[in-house]
Image (cartoon, grey):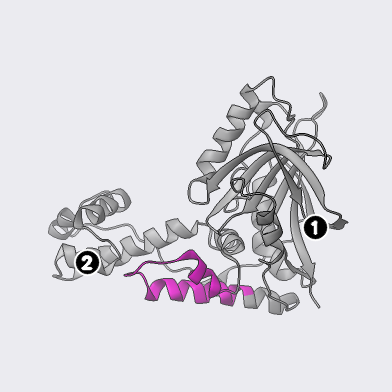
Amino acid sequence: MFPASKRKPWGSCGRGGSGRRRYDGEKAEKVENCRRNCDMITVSGGDHMTQQKEGIQRALQYIEKNLSGELNVREIAEQAYLSPYHFQRVFSAICGISLGEYIRGRRMTVSGDAVCRTRQKIIDIAAACGYASQDGFQRAFLRFHGISPTAARQTGALLRRMEIPDLRDHPSQYLPSYRIEEQEAFCVRGYAYRCHISTSHQIIPQIWDRFFTNKASPIRGMYGICIDIDGEAFEYLIADPCGKKDPAGDGTVMREIPASIWAVFPCTLSTLQDTTTRMWRDWLPENGRYRLGAALNIERYFPQTSQDTDTACEIWLPVQKNE
């Protein structure tokens, strides 16, 4: 276990910069479901990069057309031919913002234009931007713009904007170092927490803070593991490797990680967030040889010696070979 002072939030389970997470103990069958939840993009090289950006662009267009209704993560992800779990990570890495933040920002931008440039009733603008009540809309408007809709209309205030990103202008970055490993299924034992993508960046650091205060814990914290539940919720595990017959107990659970080919990205705790972003944004679409595998990922932390100034770690992403 590395010292709490050396730890900080990471990113492979988050939107490209936070924590450690996954789903709540619905048994190992949910892990097995990850095998069947693989993304099926099979193209190569620059074509892969182009197709991934086109997929995100289609998702952006879909969001724009449906701002007035209920936007479902699964339906948005389908526009990019990705699972909800993987889509939200790719979206955050490419666009630099979480999907939920982007949708809220676009709704507030469109509503701000309507408030200041039209004579529509506030309640009608609220409904057109997907809000069921005028009060809820006014609170959201105030949080985003720092001014109420009525005051914005009366004063002609200059409002905050969330523009639609043009992915064609997104520059390709250098690829992170990686290696490919093939691993048999293995078991881990640890503490399990149900997390939601929208709040995980705040929750997971708190989970680790609590973990480090438990001096009697039988778990060292070698792994931070995210296992998808439904694309929006996931189980987050702080875990160690164990044998199949090892008892759980002490508030811990056991999970079997399925056999897989893994893309392994070495980094340190201080570079983990940047490596995670480049993994989703640059390596995944540009490598050409591998596509996403099961909807899970792992961070592995190595013991820190007295000579180490940073904690060595690795991001493990399950992949499949392109045919």
Quick check: 317 left or right of 127?
A: right
Please name the residue that numbered disc 1 is placed on.
262
Instruction: Inspect this view and state whether residue 294 appears.
Output: no
Q: Residue at x 23, y 68 (%)?
A: 114
Q: Nearer the viewer, mark 1 or mark 2?
A: 1
Label 1 crowd bin: few (<14), some (14–19), many (20+), radius 10 Å: many
Query: Is 305 above or below relative to 295?
Result: above
Nearer-the-camera pick, 263 or 154: 263
Residue 161, position in %: x, y?
35, 61
Nearer-the-camera pick, 84 or 306: 84
State the quadrant of the C terminus.
Answer: bottom right
Q: Residue at x 35, y 69 (%)?
A: 67
Query: Is 235 above or below relative to 309?
Result: below
Q: Is residue 55 magenta?
A: yes
Please name the residue that numbered disc 2 is placed on.
125
Quick check: 148 left or right of 213?
A: left
Report the span colored magenta: 52-80
State the quadrant of the N terminus.
Answer: top right
Nearer-the-camera pick, 253 or 312: 253
Label 2 crowd bin: few (<14), some (14–19), many (20+), radius 10 Å: many
Q: Secondary structure at mark 2?
A: helix
Of the residues shown, which amino acid type is indicated by label 1?
Trp
Residue 310, position in %: x, y?
74, 34
Of the residues shown, which amino acid type is indicated by label 2?
Ile
